[in-house]
Amino acid sequence: MNYMTLRRPNNGIATRTNSVNDFDKLFQSVFNAMPGWTDHKPAVDIHATEDDYIVEADLPGFSDDQIDVRVENDLLVISARDEESKEEDADADSYMVRERRMRSFYRSFALPKDADAGKIDATYRNGVLTLTIHKNAEAKPRQIKIKRG
């Protein structure tokens, strides 16, 4: 079996070793701070209009049949799973590093009290899942006219 090793030549100069270590720390701090780099959760935007709540989730690389959206106990649950077929597992011994084998995630959000859990529309286009959660009609603000008495 082949192994990959990282070699850093050390010529005995302490300042050079420290600068390499400092570069590694900088590199790790930048990439570990990026959203989605270490945690496999999609980026999500949620905003409200007068009539609806709009949830937009970035799910590149998934097909619409791999995405599951459901409401459970007043929670909006978005999940997806992408598995390789069993035929591709036959080639698993030829990989030295394999980090892209399976992707999955699970996100849940509490629904607001004025959200109508029975009226949610979902569309998936260009890697973006858009959920439109309609508000209950009785929860919408309305103007009350004042009569002269």
Image: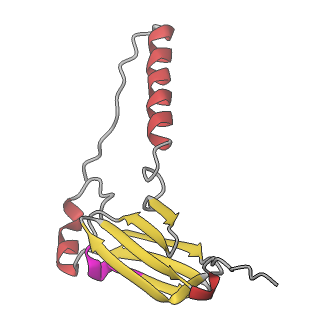
Up-down relation of residue 36 to residue 21 (above or below): below
Q: Residue at x 50, y 64 (%)?
A: 46
Quarter of the image holding residue 116? bottom right
**Between residues 90 and 25, which one lies in front from this camera angle?**
25
Which residue does the image show at 36% across and 80% down from the upper left?
A: 122
Q: Is residue 102 visible?
A: no
Q: Compared to 12, does 41 lie above or below?
A: below
Q: Quadrant of the C terminus?
A: bottom right
Q: State the image coordinates of residue 100 (x, y, percent, origin top left).
A: 30, 60
Image coordinates for residue 88, horizontal then vertical, percent:
18, 73
Q: Is residue 32 magenta?
A: no
Horizontally, residue 54 falls left or right of residue 2, namely: right
Q: Is residue 11 left or right of residue 140?
A: left
Count every numbered label the image shows and give the total: 0
Q: Is residue 124 above or below residue 22?
A: below
Image point (40%, 65%), residue name: 57
The coloring applied to the image is secondary structure
Is residue 64 part of the magenta span, yes or no? yes
Q: Residue at x 50, y 68 (%)?
A: 49
Q: Which residues are magenta?
A: 63-68
Query: Who is closer to the viewer here, 136 or 13?
Result: 136
* Above/below status of 30 relative to 96: above
Image coords of residue 112 (percent x, y): 62, 76
Residue at the extreme bottom of the image, as rendered: 118
Point out residue 148 in the picture as x, y percentages from the top left corner.
78, 81
In this view, the residue in front, 81 or 84, is: 81
In the rendered structure, the answer to whether residue 110 lies left or right of residue 24 reads right
Q: Is residue 107 visible?
A: yes
